[in-house]
Amino acid sequence: MEPVKNPLDKLPPILKKNLNRNLCVCNEVQKMDIINAIANGATTIADVKKQTYATDGNGCCTRQVKRLIECIHAPERKKK
């Protein structure tokens, strides 16, 4: 899988907030680090966990990580 050129372009405004804050508080993983892992090929929760250790604590960030994966790896919409 090729890296995503600008993953922030694929996120809705709400997911672009707090990029430098920890998304995974258990392991102190910043949201931008997770976004970069996804943009560079992580397509599953397990891939993100392997690269960043996010979701490896009590898993409270798993849902948010899953949403980021869905947005960043969503197929491009064709413009009419």
Image (cartoon, rainbow, N blue to C red):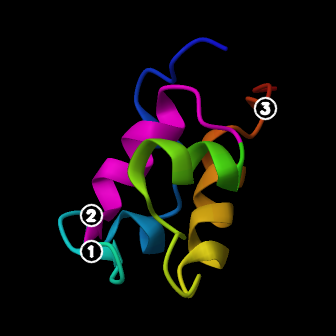
Residues 76 and 42: in front is 42
Secondary structure at numbered mark 3: loop
Residue annotated with mark 1: 22
Left or right side of 69 for 13: left
Type of amino acid at the residue the image marks with label 3: Pro
Residue 72 at x, y percent in the picture: 60, 43
Residues 66 and 60: in front is 60
Residue 77 at x, y percent in the picture: 78, 32
Marks 2/3: CA distance?
Answer: 25 Å
Query: Considering only vertical position in the picture, is 51 above or below 22?
Result: above
Rendering quarter of residue 1? top right
**Cβ atoms under marks 1 and 2 closer than 8 Å:** yes
Structural crowding at the residue carrying mark 1, measured as other residues with C-alpha within 10 Å and reported as few (<14), some (14–19) or many (≥20) = some
Question: Which of labels 1 and 3 is toward the front?
Answer: 1
Residues 78 and 24: in front is 24
Residue annotated with mark 2: 30
Asked if residue 8 shows in the view, the reply is no
Q: Which residues are magenta?
A: 28-43
Question: Which of labels 2 and 3 is toward the front?
Answer: 2
Secondary structure at numbered mark 1: strand
Residue annotated with mark 3: 75
Type of amino acid at the residue the image marks with label 2: Gln
